Each structure stands twice: as C-alpha cells, then as structure tokens.
Image: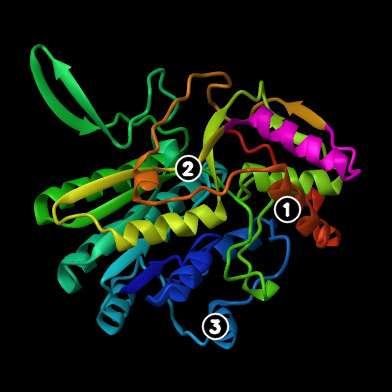
Amino acid sequence: MKILILGGDGYLGWPTAMHLSDHGHDVAVVDNYLRRRLAREEDVETLYPTPNLHERARLWKAQSGKSIEVFIGDLNEWPVVERVFRKFEPEAIVHYAEQPSAPYSMLNREAATLTIHNNLGVTANLIYAVREFCPDAHLVKLGTMGEYGTPNIDIEEGWLDIEHKGRKDRFLYPRQAGSLYHTTKVMDTDLLWYYVRMWDLRVTDLMQGPVYGVFTDQNREDDRLLPFFSYDELFGTVLNRFIVQAVAGYPLTVYGKGGQTRGYLNMRDTVNCLQLSLENPAEPGELRIFNQFTEPFSVNELADKVQRVGNQAGLGVQIKSLPNPRKEKEEHYYNPAHTGLIDLGLKPNLLTDEVLAEMLDFVARHKDRIEKHAIFRGTKWA
C-alpha cells in the first residue's frame, strides 16, 4: 500500500515508517519538527542526537535500498495538507501527528492551548483531506489507553454493550481522561466516530499503552536510525525514564504510592500492531478499536524490575517515593481487554530481564549525555 505517516519524525513515527517500508509498502512521512522544538524550548533534549528526516531517509535508502518520501510542514495549515495528499495519494494514513505529552499539556496555559490547537486541528484537517482526496483510504489513529482512565469495572476494547430499562444498545466505552493531552485524544475519537457515521470513513483507533525501548528489526545496524530516546519528565515514558535514572545513579522517581497500573508494550510490538492494523483494514463506516498493549504493570512493579536487573549489573539502584504531582488514583482496579490484535496475529515481545539488561547497557553507552536537571521538574496537575 501507499501509506502516509503523519508525525513521521517522532519516537514511534520513524520506526513505523522503516518497518512498513521494510515489509514492502510505499511509505511517505510528514512532520514539522514540533516535538524537537518543544524539547529545545523546555531544555529537555534527548539522550543522543537524531538526524533530521531527510538524512534519516538517505540512511535508510543506503541500508535497505528502499525509499521513504519526506514532506516537511505543519498539518494545521490546509495548503500543506493539500500538497501532501495530492502528491502522494495515500491508500492508508497513520496519524501520529500530535503533541504527545500529558505532562507538557499540563505545564501552563501556552502549552495547554498549543496541545488543543495542534491535536484537534490536525485531526480535523486529516478528516477533511481523507474525504476530499482519498475517501476509500483507511485511517489508523494512535489513541491512548489513558482515554479510559481507571474505572472500577473491566475496560472493554472500545465499546460497551448496555441494557437499561429493558432496552439494549452499544456505545463507545465511557472515557475519563487524566490530563488535557488525554482529553484531546478523547475528542479525536469523538470526531472520528462522528465522521465515520456521517461519511462512511474507515477508521482503526489504537488505544495504546506506554511504549518502551528503542530497537526494532530495522535499526540495529546503524545507531543513526534509532528513534528519539527521551528520559525527562515531560516527554519520556516511565520505563525509559527509570532505565536512565538507574544508569545515572538517580533514585527512581515513583509518584506517590506507586500503585498506578497501565498496559505497556515494547516498541517492536508497536510497529507490528500498526502493520497488522493496516494490512487488515476496517470496513467503510466502521470505527474499529483495539487496546494496544501486551502486559499491565504498576509503577512499583516496573521500579522493582529495574532495580533488580540494575543491581545485577552493579548499579546500586535506589527507589524514592515522591509526592505525586499528578491528580490520579494511586491504587485502583485495572483489567482491560486486549484480544483484537492478538487475534490478528500479534506475537508479543514481553518485558524480560534480558530486555531490561539490553536497555540498561544501551543507555550506559550514552551515560555522559544524561542531564540530571531534566529528569524531574514536578509539573503539577492541580
């Protein structure tokens, strides 16, 4: 297929582009480097420098012999959207092009309004572009398990069957987002569900858990093809952050009681989930939802794993409980379903000691670049 990846410069966007290209698809990426700019502005640069998209595409072509087309521009601007869609004519679109950080969205008014404007504006432009330029294209949107919150009942895969006063119906599973970022993702889902019903779009919404790791089958030969690796409070995911903290001799930052439980997945599973979703598309007029994770862990469980494997490597890892800057349940029920992608053929890469040891060894090679001032800022929700 001809697959257009919005947000193709990101932590997940670039590995997805290479993975799909490696599996025979014709791939193009578009990005405006927003994520890089915000990291510079907040003084939270990534663990190692990352080439720009044009250089990444050249490196990938030299390694694989395959081309990835690059577009640079802001998808909030309709002329950019029109130019990209007219030139590439996609058959499928992957939507990563959003401000991806819950803590950043809670930083201040400017960060909040940027998150709203960017995330909802790009989604709206995308919907209209699909209708105008490629109405049969399959749209895969990266949502988040954070849309559901932590309800005291089982979380279904996107939909809930209700019986009320003798009548039955099927509804989107109730959402109760835990940050402004997650709220914009809820609004994305609502926008897509509306236009699926109005215009018979075909959409897959992937409710993804936090991702960890850097390695895929495509980037082991050349470190310059690795994705961003953020370890700061704003843009780093929790396990990646714990790995860096362990290497740096910084006590692992467990918020509050540490019972916050989420569903996690390896980056290799992320790219495989995207491939499975794209190669088995939704039907016209269908909003298909998958819960995209492989294993649930509490923050305490992750910290204990990192401490145990880190200490086996002689790191002397410490764990420190901090007052929780977020407004969230620190102990809660959490039992989400996640069978859809398994049924399509996903074979999970689980969080083993070997995976953790490899991550610790990888980060140790970049230890001199760790900036401890970036690790914790205490951005408060309330």
Q: Which residues are magenta?
A: 297-318
Q: Residue at x 76, y 59 (%)?
A: 362
Mark 1 = which residue? 359
Looking at the picture, tell me which residue is in the foreground, 291 or 165: 291
State which tag comes first along the sequence, 2 or 3. 3
Callout 3, which amino acid? Answer: Ser
The answer, for residue 262, to whether it is visible in the render is yes
Position of 304 relative to 166 (above/below): below
Mark 3 = which residue? 64
Q: How is the image coloured?
A: rainbow
Q: Residues within 10 Å of mark 3 (few under 14, many from 20)?
A: few
Q: Residues within 10 Å of mark 1 (few under 14, many from 20)?
A: some
Is 75 situated left or right of 294 in this image?
A: left
**302 falls in the magenta region:** yes
The image shows residue 344 at horizontal and vertical percentages of: 34, 50
Callout 2, which amino acid? Answer: Phe
**154 falls in the magenta region:** no
Looking at the picture, tell me which residue is in the foreground, 366 or 129: 366
C-alpha separation, residue under disc 1 versus residue under disc 2: 19 Å
State which tag comes first along the sequence, 3 or 1. 3
